[in-house]
């Protein structure tokens, strides 16, 4: 496994769950949000939403801070940019493979 794949795998694993993806989209759209605000967009208990947030934090996709009694979550854009770069590179490799196949078939 390449180093880039090893870095990207946990990000895609974390984003592979629909509830965690909803959380990331919510944080991207509306900015930093409390746990209760985030949990309102996923059809799970607040406790389950907190576990999803903690997993996203472990993957480096969100960070949290305390504001009074509430925990506020913020999306971290750098890991998402790395994932986007990785997908772009995969797309370019795929395009090159299709071009090679096309050239082979046409010869």
Image (spheres, rainbow, N blue to C red):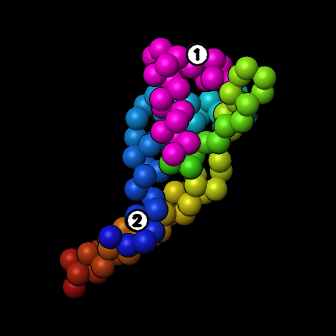
Q: Going by the image, does 100 lie left or right of 39?
A: left
Q: Is residue 95 left or right of residue 70?
A: left
Instruction: Find residue 96 and report its horizontal and vertical position in percent.
Output: 38, 75
Identity of the residue drawn at 56% across and 60% down:
82
Q: Position of residue 49 (x, y in %)?
A: 51, 24
Residues in magenta, as a range: 34-58
Which of the 4 image quarters holds residue 92?
bottom left
Q: Is residue 57 left or right of residue 18?
A: right
State whether residue 66 is above or below residue 59.
Answer: above
Q: Quadrant of the rendered structure where residue 39 is?
A: top right
The residue wearing badge 2 is 5
Closer-to-camera residue (60/84): 60
Dot 2 lies on which element?
helix
Q: Report the magenta stretch's main SS.
A: helix
Q: Which residue has dot 1 on it? A: 40
**What secondary structure is marked by label 1?**
loop
How crowded is the residue under tag 1: few (<14 C-alpha within 10 Å), some, or many (20+)?
some
Q: Residue at x 52, y 36 (%)?
A: 54
Q: Measured along the vertical axis of the image, is residue 92 above or below residue 58? A: below
- N-term-proximal mark, 1 vs 2: 2
Residue 29 in sight: no
Residue 82 in magenta stretch: no
The spot of residue 76 in percent (x, y) is 65, 47
């Amino acid at each position: 496994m390449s180093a880039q794949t090893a870095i990207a795998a946990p990000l895609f694993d974390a984003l592979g769950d629909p509830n965690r993806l909803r959380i990331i989209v919510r944080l991207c759209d509306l900015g930093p949000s409390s746990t209760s605000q985030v949990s309102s967009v996923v059809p799970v208990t607040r406790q389950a939403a907190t576990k999803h947030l903690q997993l996203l934090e472990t993957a480096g996709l969100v960070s949290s801070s305390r504001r009074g009694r509430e925990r506020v979550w913020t999306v971290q854009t750098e890991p998402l940019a790395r994932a986007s770069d990785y997908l772009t590179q995969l797309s370019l490799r795929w395009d090159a493979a299709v071009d090679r196949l096309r050239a082979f078939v046409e010869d």
